[in-house]
Amino acid sequence: MSWRVANSLETLLRQINARFPGRSVLSDGSIGDAAHQTRDSDHNPWYGPGIVTARDFTHDPKHGLDIQQMADQLLDSRDPRIKYVIANRRIATHTDWQWGPYDGPNPHEKHFHLSVVADPLCDDPQNWQLPVLSESPDDGGDGGTNFVTWGTGVNVRAAPRLDAAVVSVLPGPTRVAVQCQTRGGTVSTAGHINDAWSFVPTLGGYVSNIFIDDPAAWLPGVGEC
Ligand SMILES: [Zn+2]
């Protein structure tokens, strides 16, 4: 049986490949492998003349593709081509655009899943309007220096201290653009101790450098706040 992927998903693949050169495609996929075929019908060419209406994109924050960021921006876009998105044990559908728990057998921590609607809109090839896709491939300049966090449930705080308010929580490794760093409250974990904190404007707060995946306690190439 012949099949093809919905044009809207091919457009997103092209945009993502252009934006994140060198990204891992380890967990990418369109038509179901044996496992997908049994568990996830949108990966099968079930709509119309053999059209696959789902695609997976690999989590590779080192090369800039952060599945949580992509998934959040897809929801924010309210693009009418979206049917549902799954990432990091959560699913959101186009009925209410709200994240809810996802407890399928695959937690979707290594890729995010996008299903598009099973109607002619799925073949609409216009570009996806996501902020992350409109940045230039090498960032730099105003955005800050890119690093990746490690660990789960990492707090972003309003000030560089452990008693400052939590402004957001990073569910897993996340790509962050660090604008500057400063000395603040001492943090210790896993045998490390560090009093440096990174300011990340897009998160609106500070992350302890202990959770930045870099061997240096004071990040190279980042100025003091
Ligand atoms: Zn999938």
Image (cartoon, rainbow, N blue to C red):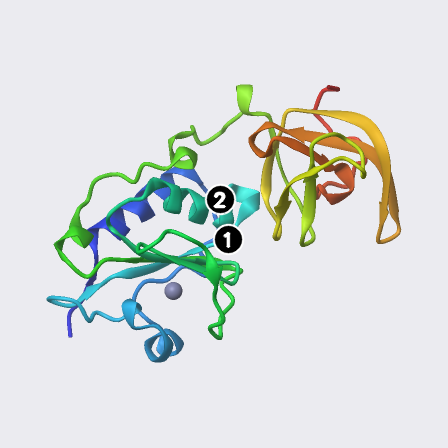
Helix or strand or loop: what does disc 1 sit on? loop
The response on whether ligand 1 sits within 8 Å of label 1 is no
* Figure quadrant of the N terminus: bottom left
Q: Amino acid at mark 1?
A: His
Q: Residue at x 48, y 50 (%)?
A: 67
Asked whether residue 185 is in view, the answer is yes
x and y percent of residue 101 in the render?
Answer: 49, 64
x and y percent of residue 36 in the render?
Answer: 37, 74
Residue at which label 1 appears: 59
Q: Is residue 166 left or right of residue 91?
A: right
1 vs 2, front mark:
2
Q: Residue at x 79, y 31 (%)?
A: 218
x and y percent of residue 119 in the render?
Answer: 15, 58
Q: Residue at x 52, y 43 (%)?
A: 63
Task: Compare marks 1 and 2 and give the one earlier in the sequence.
Answer: 1
Name above or below for residue 61 compared with residue 5: above
Residue at which label 2 appears: 69
Q: Quadrant of residue 194?
A: top right
Q: Amino acid at mark 2?
A: Gln
Q: Quick one: 95 or 142, which is closer to the camera?
A: 95
Q: Residue at x 38, y 31 (%)?
A: 134
